[in-house]
Image (tube, rainbow, N blue to C red):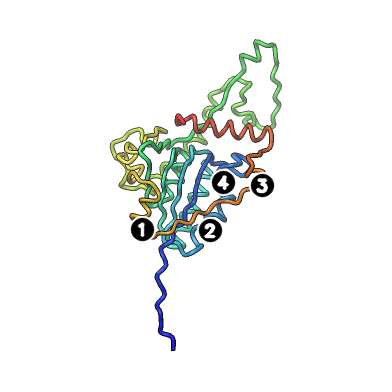
Amino acid sequence: MRRFIPLLPKPPVVSVVRLTGAIGAAGRFGGGLNDAALAPVLDRAFSAGRPRAVALVINSPGGSPVQSSLIGARIRRLAEEKKVPVHAFVEDAAASGGYWLACAADDIWADESSILGSIGVISSGFGFPELLARQGIERRVHTAGRSKSTADPFRPETPEDVARLRAILDPIHAAFVAHVQARRGDRLAKDQPDLFEGAFWAGRQAVALGLADGIGHPVPKLKQLYGDKVRLVVHGARRSLMSRFGLRAGAEAIAEIADERALWARIGL
């Protein structure tokens, strides 16, 4: 008769999801982040192997506020449904929409040199009406609906254009601020007037302001939280054959790279 041999306890599992690049709808920022691409990745991360926690490794300058909101909301739904804590670890940056994603976690850890914050909304472009006039070029635009050509770069900007843009930017900004306040709560500094004005800070400054909980890197911090035998399982999106070899489609790829580069440039990276 065999003696009963008790099963050895399995080491705890922590799922790791890398959130790297600009945030934009499918078809923009091909190597970046959007809710449609991340949905199956996050589903696996919160379910496969019954993880004790999910770690988000974030390196993003931001992007689409809608996609940021959708991804953040998905993370919170899964965390609450599965009753799994979420930890965020910031690499180079969690700025603007990247910080929105970080706030979906229960705590945020950063490097000394990480950039965090940029809690604001921006709309930017160029205007060329005088250039056209000097070149003797006449701009002809016909619309049904007087607001259809708002912010046309080849026509002078009007107070009405600015007012319409403000009417869009302000509620998006308010939603961003509300999200950060709801997630960070009393950890946020009360005496920092530009906390929600688009400013950004390096690691320890961000900790002092309550934007992050401390300086920490994924492996040592997760070992500290879940023991030295913790097993880290990385979950990522399946890439197409073209993207594996760095191949993208012509002009659209160039435009996306330029857009993403502009997002990084806003935080000096």
Q: CA distance from mark 1 to mark 3?
A: 37 Å
Query: Residue 7 location, x and y as percent?
Result: 41, 75
The residue at which mark 2 appears reads as 43
Query: Residue 49 location, x and y as percent?
Result: 49, 64
Amino acid type for the residue under numbered disc 2: Asp
175 or 65, which lies in front?
A: 65
Query: Residue 158 location, x and y as percent?
Result: 56, 23
Q: CA distance from mark 3 to mark 2?
A: 23 Å
29 or 70, which lies in front?
A: 29
Query: Who's the residue at 51% across and 49% down the image?
Result: 71
The residue at which mark 4 appears reads as 34
Query: Who's the residue at 50% across and 35% down the image?
Result: 169
Q: Nearer the viewer, mark 3 or mark 2?
A: 3
Amino acid type for the residue under numbered disc 1: Asp
Sequence-wise first label, 4 or 2: 4
CB under 8 Å between discs 3 and 2 = no
Query: Who's the residue at 46% across and 31% down the image?
Result: 269
Query: Who's the residue at 54% across and 51% down the image?
Result: 236
Up/down of 225 relative to 178, above or below = below
User: Of helix, strand and loop, which one carries label 1?
Assistant: loop
Dot 4 surroundings within 10 Å: few (below 14), some, or many (20 or more)?
many
Amino acid type for the residue under numbered disc 4: Asn
Q: Nearer the viewer, mark 4 or mark 1?
A: 1
Dot 2 surroundings within 10 Å: few (below 14), some, or many (20 or more)?
some
The residue at which mark 1 appears reads as 228
